[in-house]
Image (cartoon, rainbow, N blue to C red):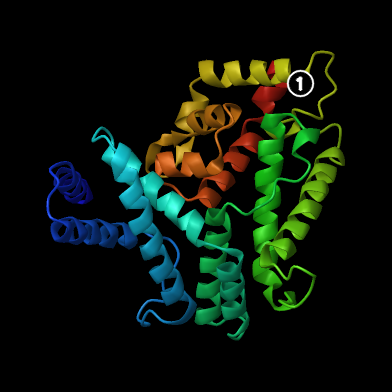
Amino acid sequence: MIDASLEKLVQLVQQDASLEAQIAAQKEVVKMLLRSRKVGRSPIGVPLTGIYQVIYERLSQQLHTELASGLQSYELTDPTRWVSGLLHQATQSTLTDDLLKALALEAQSHPPSSVLRQHALVQLVEAIRLSGRLARPHRTKFSPPFYALLYEDAVNQTLAYVCRRIDTYDPNRGKARKFMNWVNFRLDRKVIDCRRAFSDRNTQSLPNLNDLDALPQPEPAESLADTVRAYIQADPEQIFQQAHIRKRPDANFQVIAIARFSDKSWEDISSDLGIKIPTLSSFFQRCCHKFSAQFQTLL
């Protein structure tokens, strides 16, 4: 349905149809895109008000802007990917620090464990991930494959901290008074903590993909990573392809691991497979431990 509406809009623009017809078609496309939004949603059965309505309205405005400018260079080759990218870009542009702060304050305004607080926290976590405002501290200190794994672990722990300790957030603290400063300060510490946790592991424990930078090998970490990648790609025992997310054989360990070794972000993998990041990350970590014996034999 979205493809047909988008094609109609493109044709109206190309045919230089009346401005009124173009605006009507554009509104229809934006309306459909908004149905797929992940933020700016009120709890089920509750009218769209407050911060959720603000996010909805600003996202709608941003989508109109992005759509109008994007149509100038649009080609009807892969409309699904194009609209997905459009929604992602508009969402990222919409989610300013002020809106993230407002979501945090919305969560604080409701009693702990209440349905309204839980909804606000889910919206906040989703908004933080989509905003593109998470820092990448200490990135240059590690090889890309290891940092990707380390970083995702740190991000998950940071977001869990945000949910548990949202009441400790003080919007008036700091000179800039930015909400993401509070989040990124915690993320910086979590990256260090996660690295320390890897280093403190028992040296007799079985290695897995998370240990690549820490393994005492005479060859460079990049060569070791290439060896593991080639092994996963070959999958001689067909075990990496068989390990997959429930009812999704296409979302198997081999596919996800190769994507990570290719420096694909969790956001991109999530978009490609249509599976939420926490589900992908949790499955990936479990597989790393599950196949640690195979990696030890290889290394």
- Residue 116, x across and y down, in percent: 51, 81
- Residue 33, x across and y down, in percent: 31, 57
Residue where numbered disc 1 is placed: 221
Is residue 277 depicted above or below 299 in this figure? below
Q: Can residue 42 be seen in this view?
A: no
Is residue 227 depicted above or below 269 in this figure? above
Pick whichever, 34 or 143, lies toward us: 34
Residue drawn at x 46%, y 30% as measured from the top left:
242
Task: Say whether residue 130 is left or right of residue 75.
Answer: right
Q: What element carries label 1?
A: helix
| Quadrant in which the C terminus is drawn | top right
- Residue 277, x across and y down, in percent: 52, 49
Residue drawn at x 50%, y 55% as measured from the top left:
92
Query: The residue under label 1 is which amino acid type?
Result: Ala
Task: Say whether residue 136 is left or right of residue 231.
Answer: right
Is residue 122 depicted above or below 237 in this figure? below
Pick whichever, 215 or 1, lies toward us: 1
Q: Quadrant of residue 117?
A: bottom right
Residue drawn at x 15%, y 43% as measured from the top left:
11
Pick whichever, 91 or 292, lies toward us: 91
Q: Is residue 92 visible?
A: yes
Q: Quadrant of residue 47?
A: bottom left
